[in-house]
Amino acid sequence: MNEDGTRTAAPELAAEDFRSIGHSLVDQLANFLAGLSARPVTSGETPAQIRNAIGSSRTLPETGTDAATLTSAAAELLAAHSLFNGHPRFFGYVTSSAAPIGALADLIAGVVNPNVGAWKLSPAASEIEAQTVRWIAEFIGYPAGGGGLLISGGNMANFVGFLAARAAGAGEGLRRHGVAGAGKPLRCYCSTETHTWIQKSADMSGLGTDAIRWIECDEQQRVRVDRLRAAVELDTERGERPFLVVGNAGTVSTGASDPLGEMAAFCREHRLWLHVDGAYGGLAAKVPGAAPELQGLAMADSVAVDPHKWLYAPLDAGCLLVRDTATLLNAFSYHPAYYNFETDALNYYDLGPENSRSFRALKIWLAFQQAGRAGYTEAIAEDIALARHAFELFRGHPELEAVTCNLSICTFRYVPRDLRPSVGSEETEAALNDLNKRLLTHIENSGYAFFSNAVLDGRYLLRLCIVNFRTSVRDIESLPEFIVEAGAVVAQENQVRKK
Ligand SMILES: *Cc1c(COP(=O)(O)O)cnc(C)c1O
């Protein structure tokens, strides 16, 4: 406290300091972006090296340090010791490049700092979130007139959809009495290719993972609706209560899409909630070249999509869309005495589990306007076309085996010439699994490209997923030779190890 009662508090930054520090930080980050493609995809360091670099053994500093030094050092530190999912040859998991306007949006959001829990605390930001949610629905062809909200990611968006379905399916008593209030044991249905959010949801919601009925897939990793029907009918006969069917719009492993239209018809007939996990593929629903099955998501009661995947928003941003906003209010709303938030607009704390909420919408809202529907459609279509191109190149190479290609995910493996004749035999399959597993790590450590893996029918596969507007045709065309050369090195090491 100053003598005259004014304050120069330690966390404050004077406007002129904010200006100069901000300007030099933006210069530094612009240089980082300009040089990104020349860096290795990952520094590939060990935890000990990283801890050493950040000074993990230091205890909490007692006194403060100049902000300019800190921000510049932090930018430097992260540029030197990170994995860059914004690199043109990052193809791992479903992790996208971030549109730079999103970083600028986050700066605005951080400075204005609206609390998007309540409308009164975030008048413009709440309305921008509402519009962003409507635009996402419009972009994927989900009916207008519904609602939804932004949340941290696909797992949480799916969880919110799960809880909305549970509240709708289990009746009045559930929210007070817990799952026992549902009377009968609740059951949900999804394919064996469904992402692990379903286990977390069944677990966290008190149903337990045994409430999940895992339904078999066909040979293209799509759920078998005949098996789904049989499972629902069997449980119903046994006096259990089916309440939810989950459809995949782009599975996490291979990008397969379930027959959503057929599933929707089945759910209507049995009065079951259809939730679509479109965390990855949902955003491609209206993009030319994407699987036509995706269009069926328009008939779902709820759909989860991930703007931090195929809308290239910086982490984090997931989104749950619902056909009827009342279903979220029925699942989440409480009205504590200490809130004075009555309004005829939306209070987002009423629609989901979060209370105070960050302004996630701005980065999506601005990017939608920067690129437009056409710009996004083209970027996503190009990602899909590049994955297809990779698949064809792998298929044409004598030492690569291309296995699946859906949306922008393609799976494949390295098969050296000497093992090709015996592919399928137990011994060769085991050797190939071991070889490709080692190859994945070898490629990671090379810093040239980054893949992840999939396991299909016991085969260990490399997996390339392009949600990356920086990847070029040249990046893709460089891959077969790079992979096969790396494969030969790993095969050689294997032989040396065996001796
Ligand atoms: C990525 C993904 C998730 C999980 O989303 P997060 O944003 O990582 O929480 C769920 N389902 C599918 C199909 C995904 O691809």
Image (cartoon, rainbow, N blue to C red):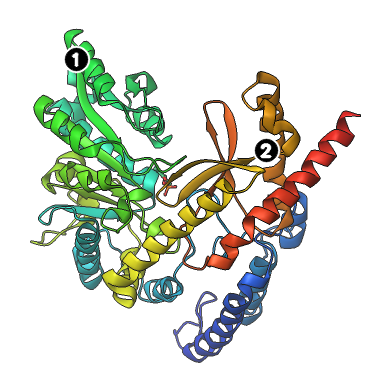
Q: Residue flagged by tag 2: what amino acid is it?
A: Val
Which residue is drawn at the image coordinates 87% and 29% (left, top)? 498
Mark 1 crowdedness (10 Å alpha carbons): few <14, some 14-19, many ≥20: some
Say if disc 2 is inside 8 Å of ligand 1: no
Say if disc 1 is inside 8 Å of ligand 1: no
Which of 75 and 493 lies nearest the eye of the viewer?
Answer: 493
- On the question of residue 74 being in view, the answer is no
What mark, if any, has residue 415 been given in the picture? 2
Q: Residue flagged by tag 1: what amino acid is it?
A: Glu
In the image, taking residue 313 as reference, residue 292 lies left or right, namely left
Q: Which of marks 2 and 1 is in front?
A: 2
User: Residue 78 at x, y = what percent?
Assistant: 64, 66
Per the model, the C-alpha gap separating discs 2 and 1 is: 44 Å
Which residue is drawn at the image coordinates 44% and 52% (left, top)? 408
- Locate the C terminus by quadrant: top right
User: Residue 275 at x, y = what percent?
Assistant: 24, 38
Q: Name the residue under label 1.
A: 233
